[in-house]
Amino acid sequence: MTLLPGDTFAGYAILDRLAAGGLSTVYKAAHPRTSEPVALAVLDEKYSADPEYRKYFEQAADRIRELSHPNIVTVIDAGYDAGSLWLETRLVDGADVASVLAGSGHGMRVERAARIVSEAATALHHLHEIGVLHGNLTPAHILVTGSGPTEQVRVTDIGLLGGAVDGIETHWATENSGYTAPEVLAGAPLSARSDVYSLGAIFHALLSGRTPPPPAPRPDVAPPPPPPGAPSGDPLSGYAPVIAKAQAEDPAQRYATPRDFSEAIRLSLPGQGAPTGGKKPGGKGIRGWFKRS
């Protein structure tokens, strides 16, 4: 379904198209009752028509609706209309990280990359604790607002693939193979550790400025990208071990949680050490580990 400015869908007045992906198209729309601008994701009809996926989508939407977290774009409502599932979220006035990378033409400073991954990890960890997988994490699904000391990170597109059915995961994984865990490419279901793999690939991309290579195909199972050990001067060189562990071929060898991966990054930063007394520095959680730059 293609909507144009001036069209109406599920009561929302379409104002503009913001983004399009394999699963959905996101529009800026006016809320039916308040006329406030919101983001409206309209899922492709071929996925919306699958009864198993529709059931998953509705259950996931119930879990994340009105979820309040500083690093998660709030889901306000969800529904089904004219053959398509839809998801309403708050409209974030910012840029996705994929666009930031494309605009710069090179990787980020490690402090900023670590901060973005840390805050995305905080969001993922919270989702996993309430039983929701992201399943669709790429730089395009991490939004940044503000700049420098005021920069904020928010994860979007939550839950659209966390329990997807056969064919839907495969379609998305093929489109985003550089960020997709090898077992998912081979047909295994998504898991918390496949989200960790995606987060590791994003850290790779933020440092290098390049999309990570997809896992090389193999008849039985797809291996991960080669460990990004790099020559002197390469921005990845000091972080190859943590990225390689996050992207381990065997999910059991990866970090168990996004928070574990974020902690490993923190310990790899120049001048950082393990926190004492079992507490994170300053008691501020993951985000407090990094200085703004």
Image: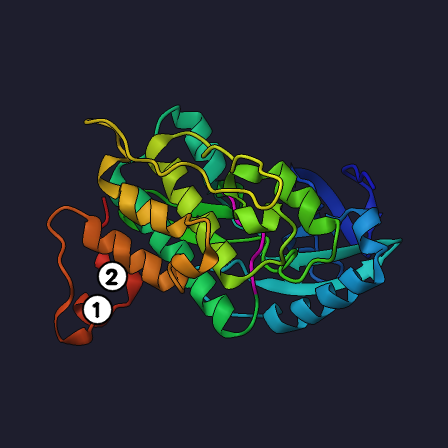
Tag 2 secondary structure: helix
Please tell me how crowded label 1 is: few (under 14), some (14-19), or many (20+) other residues with Cα within 10 Å: some
Residue with the mark numbered 2: 288
Q: In which quarter of the image is residue 261?
A: bottom left
The amino acid type found where label 1 is placed reads Lys
Q: Give the range drawn in magenta.
A: 133-138
Verify CB contact (< 8 Å) between mark 2 and mark 1: yes
Which mark is in front, 2 or 1?
1
Q: Residue at x 39, y 23 (%)?
A: 105
Closer to us: 34 or 285: 285
Per the image, the residue denoted by label 1 is 280
Give the answer, above or below, for where 147 lies relative to 156: above
In percent of width and height, residue 250 lies at: 46, 54
By secondary structure, the bulk of the magenta-drawn segment is best described as loop
Residue 137: x, y in percent?
A: 53, 49
* Amino acid tagged 2: Gly
Q: Name the spot of residue 19 as percent of width and height, x first.
A: 64, 38
* Quadrant including the N terminus: top right
Which residue does the image show at 56% across and 63% down from the upper left?
133
Determine if the magenta segment contains residue 251.
no
